[in-house]
Amino acid sequence: MTIKTASLGFPRIGRHRELKFALESYWSGKSDQAALFDVARKLRADNWRLQKEEGIDIIPSNDFSLYDHVLDTAVMVGAIPNAYGWKGGPVDLNTYFAMARGSQVDGHADCGHGVPALEMTKWFDTNYHYMVPEVSEDQDFVLTSEEPVDHFLEAKELGIHTRPVILGPVTFLKLAKARGATFKPLDLLLKLLPVYEELLRRLDAAGVDWVQIDEPISVIDLTEGERHAFSVAYRALAKAVPNLKVMLAAYFGGLRDNLVAIAAQPVAGLHLDLVRAPDQLDEVLKVARKDQVLSLGVIDGRNIWRADLGSIIDRLEPVVATRQPAGIEVSSSCSLLHVPIDIELEAALDADLKTWLAFATQKLGELSTLSRGLVEGKAAVFEKVHAASAAIAARASSPKINDPLVQGRIAGVDEAMKRRMNPFAERRAIQADAIRLPLFPTTTIGSFPQTSEVRTARSAHAKGALSSTDYESFLRKETEAAIRWQEEIGLDVLVHGEFERNDMVQYFGEQLSGFAFMQHAWVQSYGSRYVRPPIIFGDVSRPNPMTVRWWGYAQSLTNKPVKGMLTGPVTILNWSFVRDDIPRSQTGRQIALAIRDEVMDLEKAGARMIQIDEAAFREGLPLRRKDRKTYLDWAIECFRLCSSGVTDRTQIHTHMCYSEFSDIIDAIAAMDADVISIETSRSKMELLDEFRSYKYPNEIGPGVYDIHSPRVPDVKEITELLARARQRLADSQLWVNPDCGLKTRKWEEVRPALVNMVAAARELRNEALGR
Ligand code: GLN
Ligand code: ZN
């Protein structure tokens, strides 16, 4: 029986974040290219060896990247915008990193010297970000490197025969951005294919027998034409290199209406995501050719829970018999890039919780147990299967995850809890009376610069080098200075500055029950930036108030209103690893109740305005249009649940730091926040068209200061932006604020920018009042 274990990709960053440190050292000029390459080579070798030791039969190569695999592909096929000054031939590291991070001349990347980086955006619905390739209508493609071949040979030297991974041509072009809106990148497919053919020929010549071609785009909504592009591409590749076997990898969802088109491709293997879409297996078995190898992605590549090996073996056993002689592969649903490397590094973690988790290394072990169990029978792996089911059973009944109080509260949620007492129009009058703000009120999004003093004090406190009393008085001093300064420049609604917060999710997660934080469980977010997402393992509740003290301190210093500042339930959920034993929506509701408790406590303490940030609200949007309503329904419900307990007098704000609202505008309106602040400065307010045509009723603060850039906007620029906003919305709806929080900026930039913002608002006020 042919059953193999396959890995689709392994984390690149190193157990101890070696890649990050090597990159930073190289960028700062402390080490040279050779040193960086040495680290990279060692990381690759370690990964190959580890996967071999863990019993993986099909080990990937070219899953490594110094920065991002989509960028690597763009560079490899010569899709390098003119701005980077590439003259043909091999692409040097400077050009590569200029595309990744922008190049700095005199240290002024954003002021017109040097070149900006490519755009960056989220890789499907993950929290990994890729560099968006940019192609022009007259784009020529050329193979600039043979990295996939080099890495294959590098592994071979070590005695490991690998299956190179390349990003598929259809996905590459679909993710690319067209320079000039006159064409679609996919129109360039015929020009791109010869480069892929050439690459495959070289891989073939180097002794590669199988190549994994990733086409995650096959799990999203495609047009007939886009589906046809797969046929064009894969027929051409099969014809050009008939001996090279292709494993076409479709992950992050089910193939659904694309299944027939994808299964019809002349490829030797098909990889399926059976974690996100377990039900597609029956359909696939009906349409897949008998000579096709099926790679069954049954281990979750996106989450961190130990798998129930026994039930997976039971599910796959009957399938295996029908798929001979071509055979099957057992694999993770997608690359393991999205999970941390090794649970064994978490020495301080709760011992029970530890037995419930499987990180990338443990997942490899699970794959080998599965394949042995399928070949030799469950009895042969009895101990491992038993250990897995025992851990899962222990988890299910553990008092650490089950909180009857929380479950009872959830059961008691009724419609009234998700509705403010009165509609916005009535609340508005009451709030206007209670709060007394001028026309075009000015405010900020919450955080002020996290200076090196703030960060140093926090880490000194964490290490025990700074006493809690000293840390506390340091934070009080920062907060007081921020309040005084906001009063001085004349902002209308103040914030406390968030100096006490490390991260907008972590700060809350650390104070909520049901959350665990890891020490070494880093996951790549983009390039050299890694994050440690919290793990939500149990029922969520809020034992104690989380923000009331800092808010209260700030409010005690001023008569102007200070906004309470919270992170919303949907954002906390979307930036965490979530439970797989209850629906996402259920955990969302639990977090919503916890935040609701905080909202009520803030109101009780006297807060007149409470902002609930939903920075990641849109990120949770499912890849398929058909699935979006369900998500939006419960996401809206969560927001309303956390925000609706207050009286009409209390003004609820929310903030979303992006500018794409076209497909979610009804949802935004349904959230019924009294005020929403959004990013608009870069799109020059055009996005407000959406709000205008929708007749969005509540108040809006369109960002007038692009906080992503060190540039300081002048008064004229801001009044012009506001004038554009006034063409689209009623004066009475408009607030004046930056695009997002200011924590990444320097005070030298923030001070003049906000002074200008306040001046612009005053100018406008005078104009509107005819003064
Ligand atoms: N209140 C947060 C801040 O200002 C919001 C951050 C965000 O939206 N990403 O930092
Ligand atoms: Zn933001």
Image (cartoon, rainbow, N blue to C red):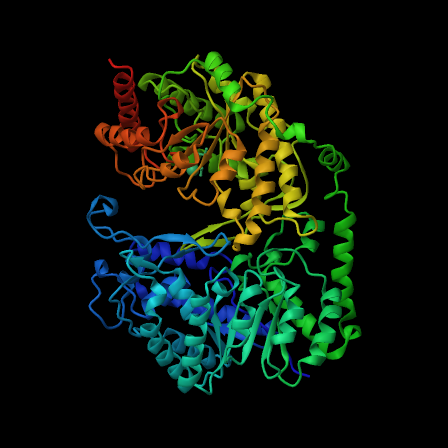
Left or right: 700 in relation to 416: left
Left or right: 271 in relation to 222: right
The part of the image, by quadrant, that contains residue 100 is bottom left
Question: The C terminus is located in which quarter?
Answer: top left
Q: Is residue 746 above or below residue 173?
A: above
Q: Nearer the viewer, residue 558 or 638?
A: 638
Figure disc tally = 0
The part of the image, by quadrant, that contains residue 175 is bottom left
Residue 332 percent coordinates (x, y): 59, 66
Residue 279 percent coordinates (x, y): 66, 63
Which residue corresponds to the image point at 41% horizontal and 76% vertical from the top-left?
232
Residue 570 percent coordinates (x, y): 56, 40
Question: The N terminus is located in which quarter?
Answer: bottom right
Which residue corresponds to the image point at 44% horizontal and 32% vertical from the top-left?
696
Which residue corresponds to the image point at 54% horizontal and 60% vertical from the top-left?
252
Q: Is residue 430 above or below residue 365?
A: above
Q: Is residue 597 visible?
A: yes
Q: Is residue 545 visible?
A: no
Left or right: 664 in relation to 413: left
The part of the image, by quadrant, that contains residue 205 is bottom left
Q: Nearer the viewer, residue 84 or 589?
A: 589
Residue 81 percent coordinates (x, y): 25, 61
Please tell me in which quarter of the rendered image ligand 2 is found.
top left
